[in-house]
Image: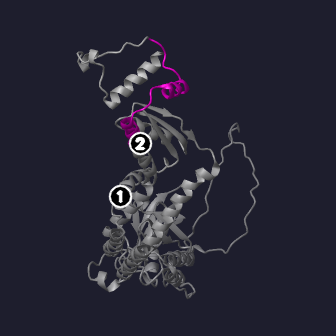
Amino acid sequence: MSPGILLSLFVLASATGDVVPESRQETPPDTLSVQVPSQEIPPDSLLERETEEAAPVTETQAEADQRLREGLAATFDRIPGLEGVDVRVEAGVVFLSGTVLSSGDQALADSLATQTPGVLYVDDRIAEETSVSMRLRPLLQTAEGKLYLWLSYLPLLLLAVALALFFLGLARLVYRWDALFDRVSRNPFLRNLIRQIVGGSVGLLGVLLALELLDATALVGAVLGAAGVVGIAMGFAFRNIAENYLAGIILSLRQPFSPDDHVLVEGQEGRVLRLTSRETLLMTLDGNHLRIPNATIFNSVVQNLTRNPLRRFRFDLSVGQSEDLSRVMELARATLLDMEGVLNDPPPWAIVSEVGDSWVLLRFFGWVDQRDVAFEKARSEAIRLTKEAFDAAGIAMPAPEYGLRLLGAEPGVKIEVEVPTAQAGPVVETDRIDQPPESPVPIQVDLGPDRALDEQIARDREEAKDRDLLEPTN
């Protein structure tokens, strides 16, 4: 008898609990040993054939095999993917056959059979299914199940969406309730900030209630965690935007200028249109829009030309060295005092700025009220009137003179040079200096503020959609 048959008989005897011969009962069970010659385990086909050639299986063993087969078959039927596995048990040896969709299902069936009590060996002959229809069937079943699940959740989902939309609409109404927030603070930025916090809180409450209705509040934690990571990355990527936003907050609290103020920033000049959370909008004196980032405004020197309505102008005129400077300066001062729009307090005055080879440069000053007159118009009119007063008084404004030195010329030698003569102008008699100056012909000049730019600014504010964070002027 071969060693394989002897091993099978021993296993069957152990499983059925048959009584061993009387001659062997003296040996304790724990000391019983069977010596089998060392050789390789026969292949599955040989093991099956030798098992069939073994002694007939007792009725008790057959019942045990039947229980194992039914138990494994019931287990496989309850596990998705293992329904196609067939089970056969003979003398504690489990034979698995059939098809599965993946190698993972095959490994699971083998593991379940191996871990079942009473199983001595598992012969795994399961094949992996390659049919397209069989592989698509679980996918279609899963999709069908999810579809039925979504259909069952549809009324609850519609109720949650309606609840969220209701609270979002309520948040929008609260956000537009200007009368409520006007009582909170006079600062436009604080009002806007409180408005956003209250409106956002109402909308967030509606979303949380909708998620609670769907039993999906765990999603909030996941979203917040992801938002934290994304926020860090976005902070590095959009650092300039955050910097401009913070600068807008500080500018709104400090209010360095007001709407319509005439400012000068980084060489850019214009009238203030509005301050937003990211940028400051100016309208240049030419009517063009100028957008300056709030961070640039915050870090730069801002010259406000409107905050003080009184503004000083100045201009330069040159006269000949032979002129009486005191008389010339007094004449200019009297001319500016008589000019419409120039203030008498503080009065205009003049200084000697520079002395050249053939001329003296005089600098004149005067003050105007920008609420009544346009600054540039007043300065232009002051220059015109002063120049006409000098001409009427015979005060010469000499042309520049240049000396020419010829190298290598012998001393005493006369050199004639032709110089083209300019067109002769009116001859001014020297005795006219002692005469009172003739009054220039009066010319009607409009010195009022430029209203054309005001109309463009007003039209721009009507069409603007961004909220102005500046406090309106009274």
Point out residue 92 in the picture as x, y percentages from the top left corner.
Answer: 41, 33
In the picture as drawn, the residue positioned furthest to the front comes out as: 22
Magenta run includes residue 63: yes
Residue 264 sits in quarter: bottom left
Between marks 1 and 2 in the image, the one whose residue lies nearer the viewer: 2
Rendered location of residue 339, percent (x, y):
46, 83
Question: What amino acid is at disc 2?
Answer: Gln
User: Considering only vertical position in the picture, is 138 above or below 66?
Assistant: below
Point 29% across, 25% down: residue: 19
Residue designated by label 2 = 66
Q: Quadrant of residue 256?
A: bottom left
Q: Earlier in the sequence, mark 1 or mark 2?
A: 2
Q: Is residue 180 left or right of residue 172?
A: left
Q: Position of residue 248 (x, y in %)?
A: 38, 65
- Residue 109 on the magenta segment: no
Question: Which quarter of the image is occupied by the C terminus?
Answer: bottom left
> Residue 295's mark?
none
Residue 323 shown left or right of residue 429 in the figure: left
Location of mark 1 (residue): 224
| Segment tinted magenta in the rendering | 38-67
- Mark 2 crowd level (few <14, some 14–19, many ≥20, 10 Å Cα): some
Q: Nearer the viewer, residue 41 or 205?
A: 41
Q: Residue at x 39, y 54 (%)?
A: 226
Q: Nearer the viewer, residue 54 or 107?
A: 54
Q: Main secondary structure of the magenta part?
A: helix
Q: How is the image coloured?
A: one colour
Q: Residue at x 32, y 28 (%)?
A: 18
**Which amino acid type corresponds to the residue marked 1 in the rendered image?**
Leu
Which residue lies at the image location 43% right of the left edge and 42% below the top edge?
A: 69
Res. 262 in view: no
Residue 444 vs 301, above or below: the answer is below
